Amino acid sequence: MKKQIGIVSIFCLLASNPSLLSQIAQEPPIYGSGDSSHPVVGRSGIVSSRDELSTKIGLDILKAGGNAIDAAVAVGFAMAVTTPQAGNLGGGGFMLVHHAETDTTIAIDYREKAPLGATRDMYLDEEGNVDPNKSRYSRMGAGVPGTVAGLAMALEKFGTLTLAEVIQPSINLAENGFPVDYDLYTSLKRGKENIQKLSPEAYSIYYHKDGRPYYPGEILKLPDLAKTLKAIASKGSDAFYKGSIAKLIARDMETNGGLITQKDLALYRPALREPVTGDFNGYQIASMPPPSSGGVHIVQMLNMLEPLDLSEYGHNSAKAIHLMAETMKYAYADRSKHLGDSDFNPVPVDWLVSKEYADSLRDKMNMDAATDSESIMPGTPPIEGPDTTHYNVIDKFGNAVANTYTINFSFGSKILVPGAGFFLNNEMDDFSAKPNVPNAYGLIGGEFNSIESEKRMLSSMTPTIVFKEGAPYLLCGGRGGSRIITAVLQVVLNVLEFDMNVSEAVAAPRVHHQWLPDQLRIEKTINTDTKSILESMGYELKAGFATGYTNAAMFEDGFFYGASDPRLPSGLAEGY
Ligand code: GLY
């Protein structure tokens, strides 16, 4: 039995309610010839995430009759165990849900909030300069975590299973142990120095006595985390926000100079929001509204690019890359001024995503050469007016979930709550510690993203669902801080504009520009001729750093398809 959905204002995207069940094809699909890479195929549902064990847990839930929301919540808890560098209980995120039965698409905002004790200048030293260590590597950098409340809310509103049922597989993993994968091993190896310095508790759990991290294939048991998960399974999210876990967090904060109190935790609530929407060549787009900037700028950039027919120039031709880079610069310039928590400031979303505004920006674009970032300023609205992880689930009932959550850096603040077994985020670094001083991702923020108690810090997370003729068609999202938005843009364009299958779309080389610094980040697989042309157009190229990590899922012609990013050593898309 489905539960009653108690949302007053939910966004109704579709005129009808086309259950995917009636569209599922009986004949297996024939693989396309000439494709450079194939997605996995499913006949009844699909899960794609950056972690193999978590994908399998989600898929088991779908196979047993659970829906996409049940599976997505189970994957969220599972990644908190298997992928502690990004999956989490101590962070926050954004979930976009399409619920087939009620034909609604809704954004669940479970972003962290600034604690009550947070103040505008809390990261400035005596000379008024930003001290990044405070916002990145101390308990003062932690926002009030939203993940547990967000996942519990999604399940209660749209799921069919109990919290205890979807958490049980994660308890099993934490209690009995699981084989460490290459991704976790790599993150532990890279994070060793900081973890050892900042969290003796975490160091004793994730590293052997001789100081080496758990190697791929070694079995890691997490008994404290199992205890925490059991408390949430039996007492619900109150265990985290008002019960034993809240006490552990508050005690650790008080002893070590952090700000989060039991009152902060008791006050935390996720928010239900209407997605940002747009359309591109007849497809409907739904994505994340503020306090994420992802949805606004995906729609803004697609609006700017729609009439330009990028496919005419060819995928990743110098001209196509140039036109994308120009739109990225205008979007990130606007981000720096107009985006922040819309509960605190009037973010001009309708204006930013309007076709008229996109037309006016396109008129300013130089079609043939790079516009100097210094000459691009954020627009003026009319008077009246970082380690993250993403996954997707689509079920046979037509439900679809695109979820991105994070603790910001790999292992967040690197500080583990003693006795509770999970890492705390350092998401406060996503605020503007001082207007116009860049954060860890080089992003500039303005007044709208200044620190205020109970405010949510601006994000780039971009869980996105593209609809075709009223049904979920393409789901995608990614990790990579400021690079998430442009990575998602390119996956969407690769499918909608360049006619790639979802595996090719995720794997294809990408570029990234964020206005400031005035550099075009470019993957090393972009060919040399193209790079030379871009340089002659005035671009400073910065090579060698993968531009975000994505994964995607798709429903087309009665079949489910999935792909996870080959840029990562782990990750699995699986259908059934
Ligand atoms: N912590 C990275 C983001 O939310 O954009």
Image: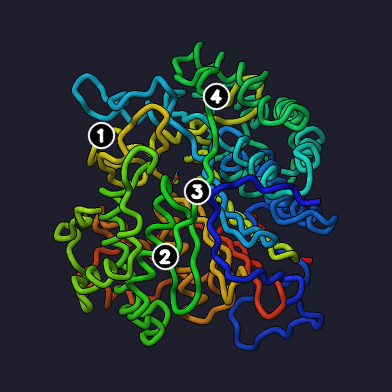
Question: Can residue 219 be seen here?
Answer: no
SS at badge 3? strand
Instruction: Find disc 1 in the rendering and name its residue.
Output: 434
Which badge, 2 or 1, comes first in the chain's sequence?
1
Q: Nearer the viewer, mark 3 or mark 1?
A: 3
| Cα gap from disc 2 to disc 1, whole angstroms | 31 Å
User: Residue at the location (72% across, 72% down)?
Assistant: 41
- Give the crowd class for mark 2: few <14, some 14-19, many >=20 residues within 10 Å: some
| Cα gap from disc 2 to disc 4, whole angstroms | 41 Å
SS at badge 4? helix
Q: Is residue 418 or residue 112 the one in the foreground?
A: 112
Which badge, 1 or 4, comes first in the chain's sequence?
4
Q: Quadrant of residue 429 in the image?
A: top left
Q: Quadrant of residue 325 in the image?
A: bottom left
Instruction: Find disc 3 in the rendering and name its residue.
Output: 273
| Cα gap from disc 3 to disc 1, whole angstroms | 28 Å
Which badge, 3 or 2, comes first in the chain's sequence?
3
